[in-house]
Amino acid sequence: MAHGYFLVTGGLDVYGYAPMPVQLLFHALLLLDPLVALMIIRGRPAGPLLAAAVMLADLAGNWSVTRSAVMSHPAAFLRPVGLLPITFFGVFVLLAALPLHRALTSGDRARTRASSPAGAG
């Protein structure tokens, strides 16, 4: 939602402070984030792995553009908006991705077995 808000309020050049690959990533998140959420809601085993990849890219982009500011004024980033919550959320997504992937994979196997015809393998 944040990237959508920034695009609406700041236009296409809202991330002009960042290198072009990071700008493109932040705009791509408008499509990637809902896609990942839909995949997880629908129980697709690839969803959590894609979520981890997208989150890792998002974290790398955010940290790459704020690293020098964080190093010069670290206390400024200890607030409940911005880099701190996105970092905590990113760590959560990365830690949850593999267990959720395993759970969805085992659930997918169970559904496949339950829906296969009796006596078929």
Image (cartoon, grey):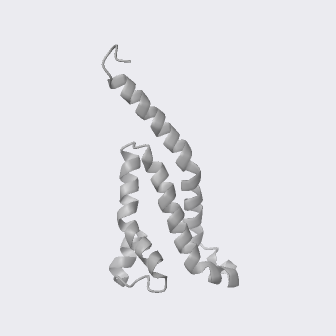
> Quick one: which residue is furthest to the left in this view?
117
Quick one: 5 or 111, which is closer to the camera? 111
* Rendering coords of residue 5 (x, y %): 37, 74
* Rendering coords of residue 107 (x, y %): 44, 33
> Quick one: which residue is furthest to the top in this view?
119
How many numbered marks, from 0 up?
Answer: 0
Q: Is residue 52 above or below residue 79?
A: above
Q: Residue at x 41, y 48 (%)?
A: 40
Which quadrant would the N terminus be assigned to in this image? Answer: bottom left
Does the rendering let one see residue 81? no
Q: Residue at x 64, y 73 (%)?
A: 78
Quick one: 96 or 21, which is closer to the camera? 21
Question: Is residue 50 found left or right of 5 in the rendered image?
Answer: right
* Rendering coords of residue 53 (x, y %): 50, 58
Which quadrant would the C terminus be assigned to in this image? Answer: top left
Q: Is residue 68 above or below residue 44?
A: below
Does the rendering let one see residue 17? yes
> Quick one: which residue is furthest to the front in this view?
121
Question: Is residue 22 found left or right of 83 in the rendered image?
Answer: left
Q: Residue at x 34, y 83 (%)?
A: 11
Q: Is residue 114 above or below residue 77?
A: above
Q: Residue at x 55, y 61 (%)?
A: 90
* Rendering coords of residue 59 (x, y %): 55, 67
Quick one: 9 or 51, which is closer to the camera? 51
Q: Is residue 15 above or below residue 4?
A: below
